[in-house]
Amino acid sequence: MQKDLSYYMDLDYEIVIKKVKRDNKNSWLARYKDFKDVSFEGESASETFYGVREAFVEYIKSAIENKQHIPEPNEQDRAVRINISINAAALKKIDTYIEPLHISRSAFLQKSALEEVERN
């Protein structure tokens, strides 16, 4: 199997997108979890997603051309989408709590669940 641009673009790399505030202006920042130097900041989530994908394409092209090692996604760290139900009042409390922490619901729920599991 030839590990070309198409090969790497088809792998399930995780993209982290978050809203950021710079100089009292909201924007979006996206980066590839496995590639700290591949990021993009834009005015909307969709612009940012497509921008970071383009940055990744350029990174992979350059890495292939320069015969650099390109890590593949770590399956253990790969995010898995799940569907849960939660009481609306509880969700509001969670959102209020995490807003100043600048973390996602998913990150908070994962951290809280792992702490509970490790206590028992």
Image (cartoon, rainbow, N blue to C red):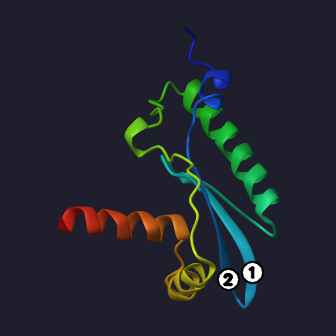
Q: Is residue 102 left or right of residue 10?
A: left
Quadrant hosting residue 46: bottom right
Q: Residue at x 47, y 30 (%)?
A: 68
Picture coordinates of residue 78, whole percent (x, y): 47, 43
Q: Is residue 73 left or right of residue 113?
A: right
- Mark 2 lies on a secondary structure that is strand
* Nearest to the observer: residue 39 or residue 76: 76
Determine which of the numbered discs, if any, sits on residue 84 in the image: none
**Residue type highlighted by circle 2:** Lys
**Residue type highlighted by circle 1:** Asn
Determine which of the numbered discs, if any, sits on residue 26 in the image: 1
Picture coordinates of residue 18, whole percent (x, y): 63, 68
Q: Residue at x 52, y 81 (%)?
A: 94
81 relative to 85, above or below? above
Of the 4 image quadrants, the one containing the C terminus is bottom left
Picture coordinates of residue 90, whole percent (x, y): 54, 81
* Nearest to the observer: residue 87 or residue 76: 87
* Nearest to the observer: residue 9 or residue 40: 9
Which residue is the extreme one toward the left?
Answer: 120
27 relative to 57, above or below? below
Which residue is the extreme one toward the top?
Answer: 1
- Mark 1 lies on a secondary structure that is strand
Determine which of the numbered discs, if any, sits on residue 21 in the image: 2
Which residue is the extreme one toward the bottom?
Answer: 24
Inter-mark Cα distance, 1 to 2:
4 Å
Picture coordinates of residue 69, whole percent (x, y): 44, 30
Of the 4 image quadrants, the one containing the N terminus is top right
